[in-house]
Image (cartoon, rainbow, N blue to C red):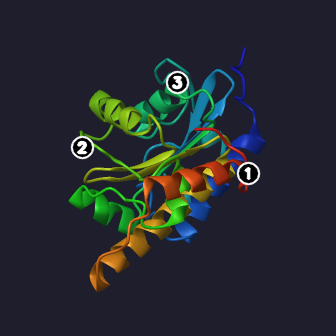
Amino acid sequence: MKPPYHDCTELRQAVIDACLEMNAAGINQGTSGNISVRAENHMLITPSGVPYEKLAPEDLVLIPLGGSPEQQGQLKPSTEWPFHMAILQAKPGVNAVVHAHPVYCSALAMNRQTIPACHYMVAAFGGSDVPVADYALFGSRHLSENIIRALQERSACLMANHGAVATGDSLPRALWRMVELETLAKGYTASLTIGKPHILSEDEMAEVVTAFADYGLKDSR
């Protein structure tokens, strides 16, 4: 008997389309990023090292939530599958995870700089800053732990000396957050080159966070 969502072509194609959109938007290069979605009690994730334009729906890898990859004719999953799994397990309201290496997010991550409340859109990620998860080897348990810690009160974070990760209750929401995160990172980096950006106060950011309850696509962290 085939597992749930084994033949869910529509969901699988949506992931491929999101990967192609991510690269077309310039927030990822090649196959360095990866995307996963919740599929009932399973996770669907992009395979390792396959160019997005060559992906077919059946190439996505199905992994039981809380389990390990079972090859059985499937491709090898992204090496980052452990932290995708950890996020989906730790955050029941999250149904999609987008990971990429956007240039400006990665630059800040190399400096291990958080994105402070330099723009009100920082509130789109759940608070008054976008934190940086501590560094650990890609694909490791420690990296998963570090990311979960950084996402405790947030829907996205930078990853020290690595890249960024964004989550959402839907795939469009998670992808929107990744694009917005790179836009913020670019703006913040530019502001540092011309002076010292003014940081919004906690009260000002709290007001924006409240306002975001009715902003755009609905979602929970």
Left of 170 or right of it: where is 182? left
N-term mark: 3 or 1: 3
Which residue type does callout 3 highlight? Gln
Residue situated in front as seen by the camera: 21 or 129: 129
Q: Residue at x 71, y 55 (%)?
A: 215
Tell me how far mark 3 sits from mark 2, CA to CA.
21 Å
Local secondary structure at mark 3: helix
Tell me how far mark 1 sits from mark 2, CA to CA.
34 Å
Residue 51 visible in the current orientation: no
Residue 206 visible in the current orientation: yes
Discs 3, 2 touching: Cβ within 8 Å: no
Seen in the picture, residue 136 relative to 156 is either above or below; the reply is above
Which residue type does callout 1 highlight? Asp
Q: Residue at x 22, y 60 (%)?
A: 111
Q: Residue at x 45, y 28 (%)?
A: 86
Left of 109 or right of it: where is 147? right
Tell me how far mark 3 sits from mark 1, CA to CA.
26 Å
In which quadrant of the rendered image does the C terminus lie?
top right
Is disc 1 surrounded by few (<14), some (14 to 19) or many (20+) residues within 10 Å? Answer: few
N-term mark: 3 or 2: 3
Which residue is disc 3 drawn over? 89
Discs 3, 1 touching: Cβ within 8 Å: no
Q: Residue at x 43, y 59 (%)?
A: 201
Instruction: From the image, state whether disc 1 or disc 2 is nearer to you.
Output: 1
Local secondary structure at mark 2: loop
Which residue is disc 1 drawn over? 214
Left of 153 or right of it: where is 105? left
Which residue is disc 2 drawn over? 135
